[in-house]
Image (cartoon, grey):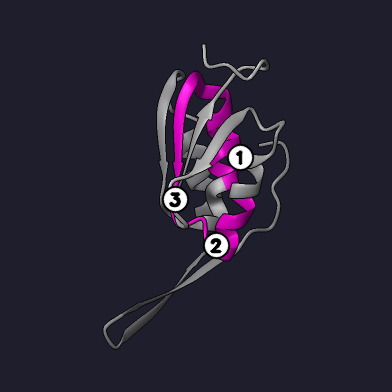
Amino acid sequence: MAQRAKLKTSARISRSNAQMTCTLNDAQVFKTLETLQDVDPDVDLVFLDGWKGLYNGVLDVLLPKLKRGAIVIGDNINLSEGKEYFARVSASNSGFITTALNRNTTISVFVDQQGEPS
């Protein structure tokens, strides 16, 4: 990675009456992203359902490995950090054709510069 920005991702998880706070530090976040660099090329399906603040970072790492026509599913995009990802893949120059399946989930198809899957 060319430049490492300071990242700290936190989440509050609530089930029943139990609550837990999880924090990923810089080293853990970047280890996750570095692990994805080892993924073989020609990825045809990505399902994003993890730390919403990492969706764009994961996409940055996997983008060069996506086959044209690959499907990328983003879950829980209605949450604040997921909205940044949705704005990115919905932009007209993103390289994706994106639609919301419901208020929480998007499906995007990776396309070439002419906007057609190959």
Horizontally, residue 29 falls left or right of residue 84, namely left
Query: Label 2: which residue?
Result: 25
What's the residue type where badge 2 is placed? Asn
The residue most toward the top is 118
Marks 3/2: CA–CA distance: 27 Å
What's the residue type where badge 1 is placed? Val
In the image, residue 30 sits, relative to residue 18, either above or below, namely above
x%, y% of residue 13?
Answer: 39, 74
- Camera-nearest residue between 110 and 59: 110
Q: CB of mark 1 within 8 Å of CB of mark 3?
A: no
Marks 2/1: CA–CA distance: 26 Å
Whether residue 33 is in magenta: the answer is no
- In the rendered image, the quadrant that contains the N terminus is top right
* Badge 2 or badge 1: first in the primary sequence: 2
The number of callouts visible is 3
* Badge 1 or badge 3: first in the primary sequence: 1
For the record, the magenta segment spans 56-85
- Identify the disc placed on residue 89: 1
Please give the name of the residue rendered at 36% of the width and 83% of the height, measured from the top-left corner.
19
In the image, residue 46 sits, relative to residue 114, either above or below, namely below
- Camera-nearest residue between 6 and 94: 94
Name the image quarter holding residue 71.
top left
Query: Label 3: which residue?
Result: 105
